[in-house]
Amino acid sequence: MNNPVQTSSTSTPHAEAGNARVSVGIALRASLVFIVLCGVLYPLVTTGAAQLLMPKQAGGSLITDESGKVVGSELIGQNFTDPQFFHGRVSSIEYNAAGSGSNNYAPSNPEMIDRTKASIEAWKENNPDVPVSELPMDLVTNSGSGLDPHISPQAADIQIPRISKLTEIPEAELQQLVEKHTEGRDLGVFGEPRVNVLKLNLALRELLS
C-alpha cells in the first residue's frame, strides 16, 4: 500500500507582508467611510432635519419676554428669590446648565438634612400663613438633574396666598393663572401634571405691569 503524499504550504514573509498591507488598507478605508458617514453626514442630516422640523426645540426651547429678549429656556430651571413671584425647586448645582446631576444623598445624609431644614426655614419665613405640614416635597427637594424647571400644581397653589398678599392680586385670579399654565401628562399617560415656573412668572409679571 502506498503512503499518501503529504504536502504543506507555508507563506513567505513577502506574502505575509502583502496580506498585512491589504488588511491595513481595508481597515483604513472602512474607518474613513464610517468617519464621513457617522461623524459628518449623520450630524449634518439630523441637525438640518431638526432645524427644519422643530426649530424651537433644536435651538434650546428658548423663552422670550414681551420685548423679545431671551430670558431662559423651557428646559432649565432658574433660582427665583423675589417673594412676589413663584419659586421653583432647589438645585444642588445652582442651576448650572453646563452639567446636570445630583449628589444623590441618602435621607440620613447630614448635608441633605441641613439643606432641607434651610429650605423649610426659608419657607416659614416667606409663608408664615401656610403650615409646614402642607408644604409639597418638591419645593424642598432637588430633582434628579438639578435643573428641573417645573413644580407640581400643588406647589404653585400653596404659594398663592403669599403672592396675593404682596402683589394685591386676588387669589382667584392667581389660581386661574396657575391652571392656565398647568401642563398635563405627556400623551395623557406619562409623567405628572406640572407647571413651568419661568412661564408662570412671566405671565405674573404681565399682570403686575
Image: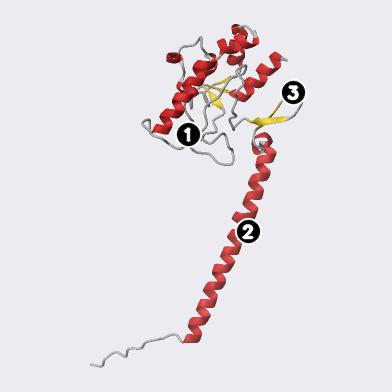
Where 142 sits versus 174, above or below?
Answer: below
Compare marks 2 and 3 and give the one earlier in the sequence. Answer: 2
- C-alpha gap between disc 2 and disc 1: 36 Å
Indicate the secondary structure of the residue bearing disc 1.
loop
- Pointer 1: what residue? 144
**Is residue 154 visible in this depiction of the protein?**
no
Mark 2 vs mark 1, foreground winner is 1
Indicate the secondary structure of the residue bearing disc 3.
loop
Amino acid at pointer 1: Gly
Q: Measuring 58% from the left and 11% from the top, which residue is drawn there?
A: 175
Residue density around tag 1, few if under 14, some if 14–19, many if 20 or more, within 10 Å: some
Where 58 sits versus 44, above or below?
Answer: above
Compare marks 1 and 3 and give the one earlier in the sequence. Answer: 3
Q: Which mark is residue 66?
A: 3
User: Marks 3 and 1: in contact by CB < 8 Å?
Assistant: no
Amino acid at pointer 3: Glu
Furthest-left residue in this view: 1
Between 175 and 82, the one lying in front of the other is 82
Q: Position of residue 191 (x, y in %)?
A: 48, 26
Q: Quadrant of the C terminus?
A: top right
Between 130 and 50, the one lying in front of the other is 130
Between 53 and 145, the one lying in front of the other is 145
Residue 112 placement: quadrant: top left
Q: Measuring 54% from the left and 68% from the top, which residue is drawn there?
A: 27
Q: Measuring 60% from the left and 10% from the top, which residue is drawn there?
A: 164
Q: Position of residue 88 (x, y in %)?
A: 55, 24
- Pointer 2: what residue? 36
